[in-house]
Image (cartoon, rainbow, N blue to C red):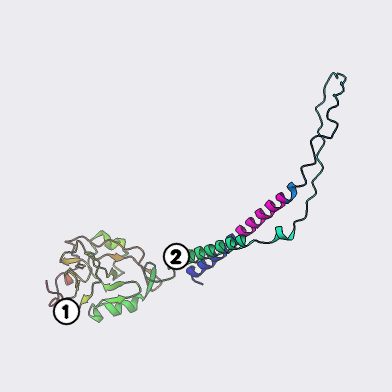
């Protein structure tokens, strides 16, 4: 069961319990009010004058230590059974309850829909750790044997590229690059205004079609209005599996960074002319 479904069930049960609780509370209040109304008619004759109130009070002998007066406890009132009319639900009460129930149901469904929409999908997809495949396989697909052609991962929205530079920029260490890890995961989103950046196989650059920003195979800045190189995601190895954490994008290297001589310049004509 997905987290979204669990959230829906939890909210539905909570709303139902709350509605039951409120309905019970309301009914109890109404019954108590009806009971009080019915019982008030029997209380008027229990106290007050007893007909001979004009007789003078007899003198009481003085006592050395007066004891506190003991008030007689009133006899418990006998509850009068409610009539059918008092037990029945009036049309106004019925309409009130129906309206409250409908409004509560509407609020419940609205809350469930909102929660379901906003609940993060933590079981996969962009924003989570994605297993891209076996390290050896991926190196074979994007490395020298494959002509350094990047591989796009649609689920994680990143380009997987082979890298054999010096790693001489803090972002390389932050994303888990090492001598033994020859892969980079470059976020395909252009750091200028956010267009998706395709790879140009002729120039071996990533060339943004929107305003012409260009990035080297390593994602480092090459030209155009972009303020820096492409952002990237941390990579780790889980056994021989490559795991890319798309929930932790790292800011790309600043302009002027060039750490791999082999691809510091375009290898052919540009796809997006300057
Ligand atoms: S969005 Fe890529 S260059 Fe402007």
Magenta span dominant secondary structure? helix
Residue 254 spot, x, y in % from top left: 20, 60
> 120 above or below 54?
below
Q: Which residue is drawn at 27% across and 61% down?
A: 251
Picture quadrant where residue 84 is located = bottom right
Q: Residue furthest bottom?
A: 146
In the image, the segment drawn in magenta is: 20-37
Quadrant of the frame with the C terminus: bottom left
The answer to whether one can see residue 177 in this image is no
Which residue position is annotated with label 2?
114
Report the Cα–Cα distance between label 2 and label 1. Answer: 47 Å
Residue 60 spot, x, y in % from top left: 87, 21
* Crowd class of label 1 (few under 14; some 14 to 19; many from 20; radius 10 Å): few
Query: 45 and 62: which one is in front?
Result: 45
Q: Which mark is residue 202?
A: 1
> 59 above or below 154?
above
The answer to whether one can see residue 201 in this image is yes
Q: Which residue is drawn at 78% across and 46% down?
A: 42
Q: Which residue is drawn at 61% across and 60% down?
A: 93
* Crowd class of label 2 (few under 14; some 14 to 19; many from 20; radius 10 Å): few
> 146 above or below 248?
below
Question: Is 22 in the magenta?
Answer: yes
Q: In this view, does 233 lie to the left or right of 57?
A: left
């Amino acid at each position: 069961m997905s987290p979204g479904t669990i959230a829906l069930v939890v909210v539905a049960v909570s709303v139902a319990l709350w509605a039951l609780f409120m309905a019970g509370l309301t009914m109890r209040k109404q019954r108590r009010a009806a009971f009080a109304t019915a019982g008030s008619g029997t209380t008027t004759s229990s106290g007050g004058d007893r007909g001979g109130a004009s007789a003078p009070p007899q003198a009481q002998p003085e006592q050395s230590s007066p004891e506190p007066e003991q008030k007689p406890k009133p006899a418990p009132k006998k509850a009068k059974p409610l009539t059918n009319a008092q037990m029945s639900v009036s049309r106004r009460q019925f309409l009130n309850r129906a309206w409250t129930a409908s409004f509560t149901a509407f609020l419940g469904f609205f809350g469930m829909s909102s929660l379901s929409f906003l609940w993060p999908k933590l079981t996969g997809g962009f924003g989570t750790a994605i297993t891209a495949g076996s390290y050896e396989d991926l190196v074979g697909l994007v490395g020298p044997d494959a002509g350094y052609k990047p591989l796009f991962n649609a689920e994680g929205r990143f380009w997987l590229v082979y890298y054999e530079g010096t790693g001489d920029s803090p972002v390389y260490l932050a994303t888990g690059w090492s001598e033994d890890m020859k892969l980079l995961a470059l976020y395909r989103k252009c750091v200028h205004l956010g267009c998706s950046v395709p790879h140009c196989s002729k120039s071996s650059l990533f060339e943004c079609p929107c305003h012409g920003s260009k990035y080297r195979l390593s994602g480092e800045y090459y030209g155009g209005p972009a303020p820096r190189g492409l952002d990237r995601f941390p990579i780790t190895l889980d056994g021989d599996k490559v795991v890319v954490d798309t929930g932790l994008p790292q800011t790309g290297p600043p302009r002027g960074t060039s750490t791999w001589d082999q691809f510091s310049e375009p290898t052919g004509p540009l796809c997006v002319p300057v």
